[in-house]
Image (cartoon, helix red, strand yellow):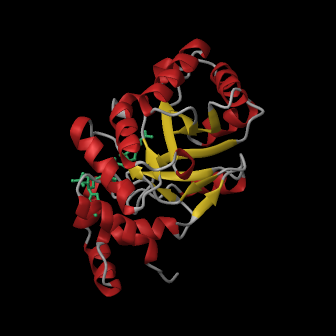
């Protein structure tokens, strides 16, 4: 699978499985199915309360940890130094791993200085518990402050991005500063199926509107993390990797 080189030196697979709003057996099954189909990148967050299910599915798959890319996020109320260290420890335990590939600040919190959170992130990187760090839901002013608040490279910004929400200014800022953009809700929660324009282009390309939306993002070097819980959806999203669109 194509991957994007992060400023930290590590690479992230361009397509991963989103896991928001799926827990327990449903999450375990979805992640195991995705891993068996060839996904190597899983997106979660401590707030999703499914890291334990994901950890179990990874063990069950038998896939080597080094072949996988795991992203998790620290909730905005847990951004104090000691809270970050504790939250990361819990994520590592639940995911049954000794490192996180990408640790993100889930949402900015103006009441906790970014520098304090990044001090904890730096400690975790030094201890090799985290490989790359990043942010989520950060606007340009948030990003400008983030870039000044740590010596570590801000590897990624995970933001809502899909055909109905084209965040051009943030994308341009991230591209200029070598911050990878990870598109969340890349299918607009399924709304891509309701668009006549997307349906008509997808028809011409002999693909699904969902695959079109994912291909459109990936051709801009945007990483996508569609959430899917059925095998059909999981496979269909993976197949978007082979779609080539003209300008
Ligand atoms: P999404 O991926 O845009 O859409 C998910 C919906 O699309 C689900 O209802 C899923 O149904 C359906 N779907 C998936 N593939 C399909 C296919 N091939 N055909 C038809 N329907 C399909 O929405 P999302 O979950 O909001 O976003 C994706 C991921 O981004 C999340 O899971 C999470 O990991 C991340 N995220 C991050 C943040 C943040 O603040 N950083 C916020 C939101 C989301 P089934 O489940 O039935 O397959």
Question: Percent from the top left, x then y, of residue 37?
Answer: 36, 62
Nearer the observer, 195 or 179: 179
Q: Is residue 148 left or right of residue 134?
A: right
Q: In this view, does 92 lie above or below 14?
A: above
Q: Can residue 208 be seen in this view?
A: yes
Residue furthest to the bottom in view is 204
Residue furthest to the right in view is 151
The residue under the point 65% across, 50% down is 179
The residue under the point 31% across, 68% down is 236
Question: Percent from the top left, x then y, of residue 190?
Answer: 26, 57
Kindly indicate the quadrant of the structure image that contains residue 196. Answer: bottom left
Report the label total. 0
Q: In this view, does 104 lie above or below 217?
A: above
Q: In this view, does 184 lie to the left or right of 230?
A: right
Question: Percent from the top left, x then y, of residue 61?
Answer: 38, 49
The residue under the point 47% across, 80% down is 244
Question: Percent from the top left, x then y, of residue 245?
Answer: 47, 80
The residue under the point 70% across, 23% down is 123
């Amino acid at each position: 699978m194509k991957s994007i080189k992060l400023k930290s030196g590590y690479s992230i697979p361009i397509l991963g499985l989103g896991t928001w709003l799926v827990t327990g057996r449903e999450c375990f099954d979805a992640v195991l199915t995705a891993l068996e189909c060839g996904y190597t990148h899983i997106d979660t967050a401590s707030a999703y309360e499914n890291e334990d299910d994901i950890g179990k599915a990874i063990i069950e798959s038998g896939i080597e940890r080094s072949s996988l890319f795991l992203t998790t996020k620290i909730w905005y109320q847990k951004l104090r130094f000691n809270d970050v260290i504790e939250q990361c420890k819990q994520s590592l335990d639940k995911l049954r791993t000794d490192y996180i590939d990408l640790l993100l600040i889930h949402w900015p919190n103006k009441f906790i200085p970014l520098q304090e959170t990044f001090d904890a992130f730096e400690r975790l990187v030094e201890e090799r518990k985290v490989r790359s760090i990043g942010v989520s839901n950060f606007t340009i002013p948030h990003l400008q402050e983030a870039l000044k608040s740590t010596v570590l490279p801000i590897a990624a910004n995970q933001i809502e991005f899909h055909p109905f929400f084209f965040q051009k200014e943030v994308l341009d800022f991230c591209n200029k500063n070598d911050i990878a953009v990870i598109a969340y809700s890349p299918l607009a929660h399924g709304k891509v199926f309701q668009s006549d324009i997307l349906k008509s282009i997808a028809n011409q390309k002999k693909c699904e509107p969902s695959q079109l939306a994912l291909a459109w993002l990936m051709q801009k070097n945007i990483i996508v993390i569609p959430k899917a819980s059925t095998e059909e959806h999981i496979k269909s999203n993976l197949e978007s990797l082979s779609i080539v669109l003209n300008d």
